[in-house]
Amino acid sequence: MSRANQESIQANLVALQAMKEELRRNLQTHTTEREGAEQGHVTPPREFPTPFSTEIVEVVIPATLVGPKVTFTGTKDPKAHLAAFHTQMMLLGLRCGVMQAVHDHLAGTAMEWFMSLPDGHVTLFPQLTKLFRAQYLANRAPVSLLRPL
Protein backbone atom coordinates (compact mmCIF):
# COMPACT_ATOMS: atom_id res chain seq x y z
CA MET A 1 0.00 0.00 0.00
CA SER A 2 1.35 3.40 -0.93
CA ARG A 3 1.92 6.21 1.50
CA ALA A 4 -0.76 8.33 -0.23
CA ASN A 5 -3.34 5.53 0.25
CA GLN A 6 -2.40 5.21 3.94
CA GLU A 7 -2.78 8.97 4.46
CA SER A 8 -6.13 8.93 2.66
CA ILE A 9 -7.37 6.04 4.80
CA GLN A 10 -6.13 7.78 7.95
CA ALA A 11 -7.92 11.04 6.98
CA ASN A 12 -11.14 9.11 6.29
CA LEU A 13 -10.82 7.34 9.64
CA VAL A 14 -10.41 10.66 11.49
CA ALA A 15 -13.42 12.12 9.63
CA LEU A 16 -15.53 9.04 10.45
CA GLN A 17 -14.58 9.27 14.13
CA ALA A 18 -15.59 12.94 14.19
CA MET A 19 -18.92 12.10 12.55
CA LYS A 20 -19.46 9.26 15.04
CA GLU A 21 -18.82 11.64 17.96
CA GLU A 22 -21.24 14.23 16.52
CA LEU A 23 -23.92 11.57 16.02
CA ARG A 24 -23.40 10.36 19.59
CA ARG A 25 -23.86 13.91 20.95
CA ASN A 26 -26.98 14.45 18.83
CA LEU A 27 -28.44 11.13 19.97
CA GLN A 28 -27.72 11.96 23.60
CA THR A 29 -29.37 15.40 23.27
CA HIS A 30 -32.40 13.92 21.48
CA THR A 31 -32.76 11.16 24.09
CA THR A 32 -32.56 13.66 26.96
CA GLU A 33 -35.17 15.92 25.33
CA ARG A 34 -37.48 12.97 24.61
CA GLU A 35 -37.21 11.66 28.18
CA GLY A 36 -37.99 15.11 29.53
CA ALA A 37 -41.00 15.46 27.24
CA GLU A 38 -42.28 12.01 28.22
CA GLN A 39 -42.07 12.97 31.88
CA GLY A 40 -43.73 16.31 31.20
CA HIS A 41 -40.74 18.30 32.48
CA VAL A 42 -40.00 20.40 29.43
CA THR A 43 -40.17 24.03 30.51
CA PRO A 44 -40.59 26.53 27.72
CA PRO A 45 -38.10 29.36 27.75
CA ARG A 46 -39.16 32.45 29.66
CA GLU A 47 -39.97 34.78 26.78
CA PHE A 48 -42.05 37.41 28.55
CA PRO A 49 -41.73 38.99 31.98
CA THR A 50 -44.00 37.55 34.65
CA PRO A 51 -44.51 38.44 38.30
CA PHE A 52 -43.96 34.78 39.19
CA SER A 53 -40.53 33.56 40.28
CA THR A 54 -38.68 31.03 38.14
CA GLU A 55 -39.52 28.29 40.66
CA ILE A 56 -43.24 28.93 40.22
CA VAL A 57 -43.03 29.18 36.44
CA GLU A 58 -41.21 25.83 36.30
CA VAL A 59 -43.93 23.96 38.22
CA VAL A 60 -45.43 21.48 35.76
CA ILE A 61 -49.17 21.94 35.35
CA PRO A 62 -51.03 18.81 34.24
CA ALA A 63 -52.33 19.15 30.70
CA THR A 64 -55.71 17.93 31.93
CA LEU A 65 -56.06 20.77 34.45
CA VAL A 66 -59.38 22.52 34.24
CA GLY A 67 -58.95 25.35 36.69
CA PRO A 68 -61.48 27.15 38.82
CA LYS A 69 -64.37 28.88 37.12
CA VAL A 70 -63.93 32.19 38.96
CA THR A 71 -62.74 35.39 37.31
CA PHE A 72 -61.72 38.59 39.07
CA THR A 73 -61.94 41.90 37.23
CA GLY A 74 -61.04 44.20 40.11
CA THR A 75 -64.55 45.25 41.06
CA LYS A 76 -65.57 42.67 43.68
CA ASP A 77 -64.39 41.64 47.12
CA PRO A 78 -60.82 40.26 46.79
CA LYS A 79 -61.18 38.15 49.94
CA ALA A 80 -64.25 36.40 48.54
CA HIS A 81 -62.49 35.81 45.23
CA LEU A 82 -59.40 34.36 46.89
CA ALA A 83 -61.55 32.11 49.07
CA ALA A 84 -63.45 30.82 46.04
CA PHE A 85 -60.25 30.33 44.03
CA HIS A 86 -58.44 28.57 46.86
CA THR A 87 -61.43 26.32 47.64
CA GLN A 88 -61.81 25.27 44.02
CA MET A 89 -58.07 24.55 43.71
CA MET A 90 -58.22 22.37 46.83
CA LEU A 91 -61.31 20.55 45.52
CA LEU A 92 -59.33 19.80 42.35
CA GLY A 93 -56.58 18.36 44.54
CA LEU A 94 -54.07 21.03 43.58
CA ARG A 95 -51.67 22.62 45.98
CA CYS A 96 -50.99 26.33 46.15
CA GLY A 97 -47.73 25.80 44.24
CA VAL A 98 -49.74 25.72 41.03
CA MET A 99 -50.10 29.48 41.19
CA GLN A 100 -49.71 30.01 37.46
CA ALA A 101 -53.41 29.20 37.21
CA VAL A 102 -54.26 32.43 39.02
CA HIS A 103 -53.51 34.66 36.05
CA ASP A 104 -56.02 32.71 33.96
CA HIS A 105 -58.68 33.99 36.33
CA LEU A 106 -57.87 37.68 36.20
CA ALA A 107 -59.31 40.10 33.69
CA GLY A 108 -59.35 43.81 32.96
CA THR A 109 -57.72 46.07 35.54
CA ALA A 110 -56.93 43.07 37.76
CA MET A 111 -54.78 41.54 35.01
CA GLU A 112 -53.15 44.91 34.34
CA TRP A 113 -52.29 45.24 38.04
CA PHE A 114 -50.91 41.70 38.19
CA MET A 115 -48.72 42.20 35.13
CA SER A 116 -47.41 45.48 36.57
CA LEU A 117 -45.75 43.61 39.45
CA PRO A 118 -41.96 43.31 39.07
CA ASP A 119 -40.62 40.38 37.07
CA GLY A 120 -40.05 37.35 39.35
CA HIS A 121 -41.45 39.18 42.40
CA VAL A 122 -44.05 36.61 43.55
CA THR A 123 -42.52 33.57 45.25
CA LEU A 124 -45.29 32.24 47.50
CA PHE A 125 -49.09 32.07 47.40
CA PRO A 126 -49.46 33.88 50.78
CA GLN A 127 -47.35 36.73 49.37
CA LEU A 128 -49.59 36.97 46.30
CA THR A 129 -52.67 36.88 48.54
CA LYS A 130 -51.32 39.76 50.65
CA LEU A 131 -50.49 41.87 47.58
CA PHE A 132 -53.88 41.10 46.04
CA ARG A 133 -55.83 42.02 49.17
CA ALA A 134 -53.84 45.23 49.62
CA GLN A 135 -54.44 46.28 46.02
CA TYR A 136 -58.18 45.71 46.21
CA LEU A 137 -58.72 46.71 49.85
CA ALA A 138 -61.30 49.32 48.83
CA ASN A 139 -63.42 46.58 47.24
CA ARG A 140 -63.80 44.55 50.42
CA ALA A 141 -67.30 43.95 51.61
CA PRO A 142 -68.07 46.28 54.51
CA VAL A 143 -67.99 44.79 57.97
CA SER A 144 -71.30 45.23 59.71
CA LEU A 145 -71.07 47.68 62.60
CA LEU A 146 -74.10 46.11 64.23
CA ARG A 147 -73.50 42.97 66.18
CA PRO A 148 -76.13 40.26 66.11
CA LEU A 149 -78.19 40.04 69.26
Image: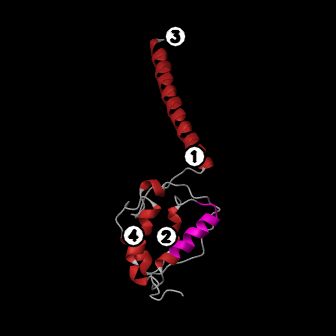
Q: Is residue 78 magenta?
A: no
* Distance (Cα) linking label 1 and label 4: 35 Å
Q: Which residue is mark 4?
A: 131
Q: Which mark is residue 1?
A: 3
Label 1: which residue? 36
Check contact, mark 1 vs mark 3: CB within 8 A. no
Viewer-nearest residue: 2 or 56? 56
- Give me the residue at 47% from left, 62% from top: 125
Residue 81 on image: x %, y %: 52, 76
Q: CA distance from mark 1 to mark 2?
A: 26 Å
Front of the two marks 1 and 2:
2
Q: Nearer the viewer, residue 44 or 149?
A: 149
Type of residue at label 1?
Gly
Q: Earlier in the sequence, mark 1 or mark 3?
A: 3
**Secondary structure at numbered mark 1:** helix
Which segment is the magenta one? 81-94
Asked if residue 92 is among those painted magenta in the image, a careful observer would answer yes
Q: Tell me how many marks there are.
A: 4
The residue at the point 54 percent across, 34 percent down is 23
| Marked residue nearer the N-terminal end (4 or 2) | 2
Q: Compute the Cα span from label 4 to label 3.
A: 81 Å
110, above or below 142, in the image: above
Judged from the image, the secondary structure of the residue bearing numbered disc 3 is: loop
Label placed on residue 103: 2
Closest to the camera, between mark 1 and mark 4, is 4
Please identify the quadrant where the C terminus is shown: bottom right
Residue 116 on image: x %, y % = 36, 71
Magenta stretch: dominant SS?
helix
* Circle nearer the N terminus (1, 4): 1
Task: Name the amino acid type tagged 2.
Answer: His
Q: Is residue 80 above or below residue 145?
A: above
